[in-house]
């Protein structure tokens, strides 16, 4: 547990969008999916999950529908809307640019400066 | 953005469902987690505990989730409102006083604003009213633009399709006589040019509207009804279209009904029957010439032609148009002056109203006055809130101590203020609706009925809501800031009754109220004084006992009719007249002593009067004789001039026996002066009496004015009824109405009466509000100082000294208020000087009276609390907590 990094601000939304883009998920499923796709490296604070989900739904990026879960219980499943898909793409590109820039910056050796 | 709104709407509409689903979803989460933990080998009980622990409080999660969707603030608002209403219910006295105060203040503002809106701001209910312009001829330097044109001019403008889609001309509203002999009635009507309805872009409610073809010489006579008249007279029966009405004695076919809401371009005056201009009873009005500028215009510039461009091109076009429409019989100088005139286009969206000229300034003055009243009301509510804040200090300190943020408490306090304001505004709207009717009734007692639709529209509702919100901020922010700016620990330790800091503000609020009340009282006194002075003013003629009956045309045998009227019991003298004093209608002509050249412009007012004219009005003659039966139609033309005329044109020469060169209704006349009359206020009670030339009624050429004037003794109502019985059979085409001259004179004082009534009433309202404020301040300070007073009295202070002590608390703010109020009142009354009569802004009676009344009322308001202070029982006061 101690090796899991805290989530950077703003990356939770991106992770949720990514997780949901892989298939409809209920809230707890989002948590598990993120754990899975980050190989357990990033921990989502449980308390932060639902506010984020509601906010994204409110912004029209996610769509919530009630359905039946694997264990035959009623659960709310989230899917990505068209706007959500567009946002995910933009955020991913922006993230990649930032990450590349950061990584390049951090690789700089004294002689190259 | 749209998604957000939809989400809001969904959440709010199905609030319970939202809460339930949130609950279910989170519970599912915790259970799923617990199930996973069981799978990892935990006992079910331990798993459930761990899962709950990891997730944290579901309620807290829900709260954060609500905030993220943005509905939490609404929840809190609802809570605040509920809490505020509970507080009001606990403090009914406070809530009722505040709401009533605000309702009075906001109601007065709404009432005046509704009138301003109806008279000046509301657009005509026509197609794209903002595109309409009014044509004016620029006057000479310093003169106002000239807004009326002759019939041929308006038609010529309308033909310029390169500039305008249409140019509509309309005459002022007036009465037309409708119906067959025996069932005559006067109905308000208007004459319009053929382009009127098309230019305004109106579609008929039934039938068709007047078109250009209807306004051609020889076209069949037609009439358009207003929707209201169609409803009242024909119960909206479509068969009314095609029926024939007798209008001014001639048949006209009803061709259609104008759309509901549209009652003509004259704002405030309904035209129930609209006729093509070509049907005017005076054919002279269709020609070019002097005195025939009777049509106002509304023009719609062609699409793509800007207003500025239209003006420039109209000025160019005028060079050609002018040649054809300027009267050829004018002198070369006047023709040239008109031909060189420039056009000014002004916005036409709001139509035109003669009421605007009269009431614009009074209404803005009243708007300022009700604004001051609102300020006084705000000061009242603010001091109520502050006084209450001190008793709530402990409540607020507790809430701060247990962790409420200051902003949160301020929001709660401001919600209370806003709520008070909104309830007050609702009351104010009702009040305005009622008082608006009263105002219209006052306005309608004049010669014309004033018709406004005062049901609150969007403008008025927006205004009232805006005022309410503004007031809430005005009276709510300071108390809210003050009552939350405290150190909870100190306040909790402190005894609420000795808490300080709040009362510092209260005296300054009283000062403000006193200053504003003084301004309003002095203004009220000045307007009441103006009305009194005008009523007591001698107009140069006696109105008491004089009855008037307007006949639409001169009777065939005037003197025989007069003889018949003189036989009516109670009639002392009877005469004919073309124009009666202060009727609003006037006749002017050029007239100069013989030998001088007759000028282009009119030099004197003319009045045609019969024998006994001067006896009936009791206008004294300074020299010479009055008109007699011998001044008949065929005998030598004579005239009586008034002293002003003598002073202006005969400068020192003895006028009797002199001759005047004149032109009467276009016919040259040589008049011998046979008498000199004293001056009268023929056209207005204010200002200088005009120069007047009286001529014998039967010697007026082409006359079509006729009013029977009678001086009667005894019961005027009986004489009036008897006169009507004589006149009606003699004038079968006229609905004869007999009315007193005094009513006609009173009607000219309408504006003054409105100002005196309203300014007086607002002064009294201000006084009442200010006295409530003073009472509140003292009652509060006595309540807070009960213990101190008890100690003083226990130590031997006399009751009288205690009363003085309390009264001193209010004397200072009242005195300062008056010192501030006096110069403010002087400045304010300077700005309305032109509306006053017979007194100056510094009128000692108005100022002294206002100070006296204010002082007396302040003392009366202070008396009750002071007495309560003097009755304090030291033992009780000291034991009191």
Image: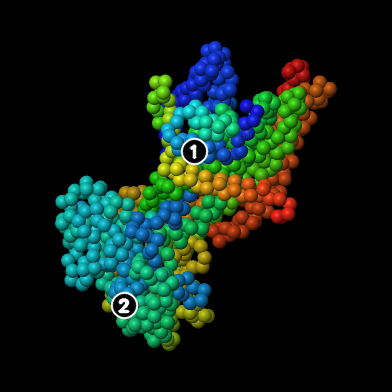
State left or right for residue B570 relative to residue B875.
Answer: left
Is residue B556 shown to the viewer in this render? no
Residue B767 x, y percent position in the rendering: 60, 41
**Circle 1 residues within 10 Å: few <14, some 14–19, many ≥20:** many
Chain under numbered label 1:
A
Residue A35 x, y percent position in the rendering: 54, 30
- Marks 2 and 1: in contact by CB < 8 Å? no
Residue visible at 17% across and 55% down?
A: B241
Residue visible at 41% across and 70% down?
A: B306
Residue B9 x, y percent position in the rendering: 43, 36
State left or right for residue B331 relative to residue B479.
Answer: left
> In terms of secondary structure, where does tag 2 sit?
loop
Observer-nearest residue: B326 or B419? B419
Residue at the far right in the pictured view = B795
Q: Which of the image's four quarters has the C terminus of chain B? A: top right
Report the disc number at residue B288: 2
Instruction: Say which residue label 1 marks.
Output: A18
**Circle 2 residues within 10 Å: few <14, some 14–19, many ≥20:** many
Report the disc number at residue B137: none
Observer-nearest residue: B49 or B680? B49
Q: Coloring scheme of the render?
A: rainbow
Please give the count of numbered marks on the rendered protein: 2
Do discs 1 and 2 belong to a common subunit? no
Residue visible at 42% across and 45% down?
A: B456
Residue B496 x, y percent position in the rendering: 72, 25
State left or right for residue B252 relative to residue B411.
Answer: left
Observer-nearest residue: B728 or B345? B345
State left or right for residue B286 relative to residue B847.
Answer: left
Residue visible at 70% across and 39% down?
A: B505
Q: Quadrant of residue B276?
A: bottom left
1 vs 2, front mark: 1
């Amino acid at each position: 547990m101690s090796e899991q990094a805290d989530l950077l601000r703003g990356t939770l939304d991106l992770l949720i969008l990514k997780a949901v883009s892989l298939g409809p998920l209920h809230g707890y499923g989002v948590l598990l999916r993120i754990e899975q796709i980050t190989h357990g490296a990033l921990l989502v604070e449980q308390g932060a999950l639902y506010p984020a989900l509601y906010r994204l739904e409110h912004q029209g990026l996610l769509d919530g529908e009630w359905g039946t879960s694997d264990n035959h219980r009623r659960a709310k499943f989230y899917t990505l809307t068209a706007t959500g898909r567009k946002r995910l793409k933009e955020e991913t590109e922006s993230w990649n640019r930032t990450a590349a820039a950061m990584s390049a910056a951090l690789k700089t050796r004294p002689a190259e400066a | 953005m749209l998604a957000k709104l939809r989400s809001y709407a969904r959440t709010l509409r199905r609030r319970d469902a939202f809460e339930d689903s949130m609950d279910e979803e989170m519970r599912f989460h915790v259970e799923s987690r617990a199930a996973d933990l069981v799978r990892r080998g935990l006992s079910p009980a331990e798993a459930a505990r761990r899962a709950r622990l990891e997730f944290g409080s579901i309620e807290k999660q829900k709260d954060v989730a609500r905030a993220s969707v943005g509905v939490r603030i609404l929840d809190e608002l609802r809570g605040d409102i509920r809490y505020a209403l509970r507080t009001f219910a606990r403090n009914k006295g406070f809530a009722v006083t505040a709401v009533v105060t605000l309702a009075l203040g906001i109601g007065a503002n709404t009432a005046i604003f509704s009138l301003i809106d109806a008279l000046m701001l509301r657009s005509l209910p026509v197609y794209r009213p903002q595109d309409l312009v009014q044509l004016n001829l620029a006057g000479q330097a310093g003169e106002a633009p000239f807004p009326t044109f002759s019939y041929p001019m308006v038609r010529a403008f309308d033909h310029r399709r390169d500039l305008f889609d249409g140019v509509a001309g309309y005459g002022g509203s007036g009465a037309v006589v409708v119906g067959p002999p025996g069932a005559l009635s006067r109905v308000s009507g208007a004459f319009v040019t053929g382009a009127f309805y098309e230019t305004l872009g109106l579609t008929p409610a039934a039938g068709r509207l007047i078109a250009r073809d209807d306004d051609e010489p020889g076209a069949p006579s037609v009439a358009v009804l207003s929707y209201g008249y169609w409803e009242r007279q024909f119960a909206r029966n479509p068969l009314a279209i095609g029926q024939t009405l007798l209008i001014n004695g001639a048949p006209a076919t009803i061709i259609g009904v104008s759309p509901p809401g549209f009652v003509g371009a004259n704002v405030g005056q309904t035209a129930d029957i609209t006729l093509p201009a070509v049907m005017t009873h005076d054919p002279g009005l269709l020609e070019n010439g002097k005195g025939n500028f009777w049509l106002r215009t509304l023009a719609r510039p062609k699409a793509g032609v800007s207003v500025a461009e239209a003006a420039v091109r109209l000025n160019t076009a005028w060079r050609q148009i002018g040649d054809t429409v300027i009267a050829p019989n004018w002198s070369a100088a006047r023709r040239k002056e008109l031909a060189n005139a420039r056009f000014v286009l002004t916005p036409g969206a709001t139509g035109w109203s003669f009421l605007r000229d009269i009431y614009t300034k009074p209404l803005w003055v009243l708007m300022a006055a009700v604004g001051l009243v609102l300020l006084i009301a705000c000061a009242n509510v603010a001091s109520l809130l502050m006084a209450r804040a001190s008793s709530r200090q402990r409540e607020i300190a507790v809430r701060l101590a247990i962790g409420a943020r200051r902003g949160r408490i301020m929001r709660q306090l401001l919600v209370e203020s806003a709520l008070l304001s909104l309830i007050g505004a609702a009351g104010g709207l009702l009040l305005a609706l009622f008082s608006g009717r009263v105002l219209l009734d006052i306005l309608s007692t004049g010669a014309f009925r004033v018709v406004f639709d005062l049901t609150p529209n969007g403008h008025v509702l927006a205004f009232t809501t805006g005022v309410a919100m503004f007031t809430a901020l005005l009276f709510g922010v300071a108390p809210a800031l003050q009552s939350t700016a405290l150190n909870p620990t100190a306040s909790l330790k402190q005894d609420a009754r000795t808490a300080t800091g709040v009362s510092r503000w209260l005296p300054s609020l009283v000062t403000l109220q006193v200053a504003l009340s003084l301004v309003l009282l002095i203004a009220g006194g000045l307007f009441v004084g103006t009305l009194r002075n005008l009523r007591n003013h001698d107009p140069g003629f006696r109105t008491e006992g004089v009855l008037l009956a307007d006949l639409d045309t001169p009777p065939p045998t005037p003197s025989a009719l007069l003889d018949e009227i003189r036989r009516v019991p109670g009639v002392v003298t009877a005469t004919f007249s073309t124009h009666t004093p202060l009727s609003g209608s006037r006749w002017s002509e050029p007239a100069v002593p013989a030998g001088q050249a007759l000028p282009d412009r009119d030099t004197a007012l003319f009045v045609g009067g019969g024998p006994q004219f001067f006896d009936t009005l009791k206008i004294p003659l300074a020299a010479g004789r009055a008109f007699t039966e011998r001044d008949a139609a065929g005998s030598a033309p004579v005239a009586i001039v008034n002293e002003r005329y003598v002073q202006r044109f005969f400068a020192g020469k003895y006028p009797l026996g002199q001759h005047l060169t004149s032109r009467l209704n276009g016919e040259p006349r040589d008049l011998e002066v046979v008498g000199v009359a004293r001056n009268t206020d023929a056209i207005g009670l204010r200002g200088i009496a005009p120069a007047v030339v009286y001529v014998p009624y039967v010697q007026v050429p082409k006359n079509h004015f006729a009013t029977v004037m009678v001086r009667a003794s005894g019961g005027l109502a009986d004489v009036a009824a008897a006169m009507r019985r004589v006149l009606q059979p003699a004038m079968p085409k006229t609905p004869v109405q007999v009315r007193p001259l005094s009513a006609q004179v009173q009607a000219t004082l309408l504006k003054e009466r409105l100002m005196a009534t309203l300014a007086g009433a607002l002064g009294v309202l201000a006084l009442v509000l200010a006295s409530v404020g003073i009472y509140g301040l003292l009652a509060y300070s006595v309540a807070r100082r009960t213990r101190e007073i008890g100690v003083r009295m226990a130590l031997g202070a006399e009751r009288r000294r205690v009363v003085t002590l309390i009264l001193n608390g209010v004397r200072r703010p009242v005195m300062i208020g008056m010192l501030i109020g006096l110069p403010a009142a002087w400045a304010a009354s300077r700005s309305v000087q032109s509306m006053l009569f017979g007194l100056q802004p510094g009128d000692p009676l108005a100022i002294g009276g206002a100070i006296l009344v204010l002082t007396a009322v302040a003392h009366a308001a202070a008396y009750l609390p002071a007495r309560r202070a003097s009755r304090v029982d030291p033992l009780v006061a000291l034991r009191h907590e």
